[in-house]
Image (spheres, grey):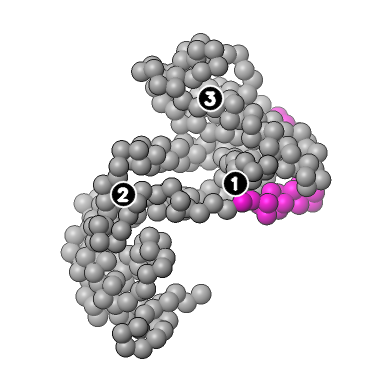
Amino acid sequence: MKIIKPRLVTDELKLLRFLHSRMEFPVDDLRRFENLEKGFKGEQIFDKWSEDILIDGLILNDLLFEVNNTVFQIDSTLISQGTLFQFEVKNFEGDYYLEGDKWLTLSGSTIRNPLHQLERSEILLKQLLQNNGYNMHIESYLLFINPNFHLYHAPINQSIIFPTQLSRFLDKLNRTPSKLNGKHSKLAETLVSKQTFQSPYKRLPNYEYNQLEKGICCPYCRVFMDDTLKCKCGFEEAPSAAILRGIEEFRWLFPDRRITTNGVYEWCGGMVSRKTIWKVLSSNFQLEGHGQSAHYVKIN
Ligand SMILES: [Zn+2]
């Protein structure tokens, strides 16, 4: 199989990571952030697992569509010769149980029925394909990737793949006869081009420049590095690289604010000299305006 669209950290998760190092999140935002991180970890485990899909197939990750005014996202899609597989990946951990159609945690809180979610996106995906002249057979699966997940009263449902079934499911996938041609590549292209875009800024907690902690964060553990640009985890960074990362974070969090030497100095918590910042800005950005209004813009 070939990966046509690799999985990246979503813009929203990226922004949340930047923010989380620099401010306290309200409880709801914190829960959402943790859920997104957990979901992303699960997807990475899925990606590792899917490397063993050996058939002639095309993989597209994280597709976001809008059909009938409904936005839906598909964690992973596998195009084979005769079937389009839709995979919804869940990184649930611990014990869950079913009460009729309801999914509950052992502590009694209800979660959104993932099977309904799966069915809904299959219907919408089918429609999207038809709207674009494709009449492809779709198979949808809900994959529970975490070995510490258990579902009491689990129904016998071919769409659900539990952790203990993952390797047999892989064998089954690998027995799918598949020989792709140009039509399949065209389908992959169509799916990528028919995606919708959602602003990653919409669901962030409220934040303001003054309220955020300043400094340069380690890209791995997301805690602030010390004045020598070293992190507790052992990561060390050259000033120029640290400054560039700091500017990148600043540009993501404040796309409307101007980039100046003094601004970057403050944003980096005074950990690097103005002179070094000026050098980095001069060689990587373009200076616009004069005097008071002078600022740097990214060279494209
Ligand atoms: Zn670190």
Viewer can see residue 34:
no
Residue wearing tag 1: 64
Picture quadrant where residue 158 is located:
top right
| Residue 26 position (above or below residue 220) | above
Label whose residue precedes the other's in the sequence (3 or 1) = 1
Q: Which mark is residue 20?
A: 2
For disc 3, the marked residue is 113
User: Where 157 sits versus 255, above or below?
Assistant: above
Residue 290 lies in the magenta stretch: no
What secondary structure is found at the residue carrying circle 3?
A: loop
Which class describes the residues within 10 Å of circle 2: few (<14), some (14-19), or many (20+)? some
Q: Look at label 1 and name its amino acid.
A: Leu
User: Where is residue 217 drawn, in percent x and y?
Assistant: 28, 57
Q: Determine the CA span between mark 1 and mark 2.
A: 25 Å
Q: Are marks 3 and 1 in contact (CB under 8 Å)?
A: no
Determine the image quadrant of residue 40.
top left
Residue in the picture at 28% in, 72% down: 263
2 or 3: tag closer to the N-terminus: 2
Type of residue at label 3?
Asn
Query: Relative to residue 190, is residue 264 drawn left or right?
Result: left
Instruction: Establish whether ligand 1 lies closer than 8 Å to the Cβ of label 2.
Output: no
Residue type for callout 2: His
Q: Position of residue 24 (x, y in %)?
A: 26, 47
Residue extending farthest bottom: 290
Residue appearing at x 31%, y 69% in the figure: 243
Instruction: Give the magenta range.
Output: 174-196
Q: Residue drawn 40% across and 49% down?
A: 204
Which circle's residue, 1 or 2, is located before the other in the chain?
2
Q: Note whether ligand 1 is within 8 Å of mark 3.
A: no
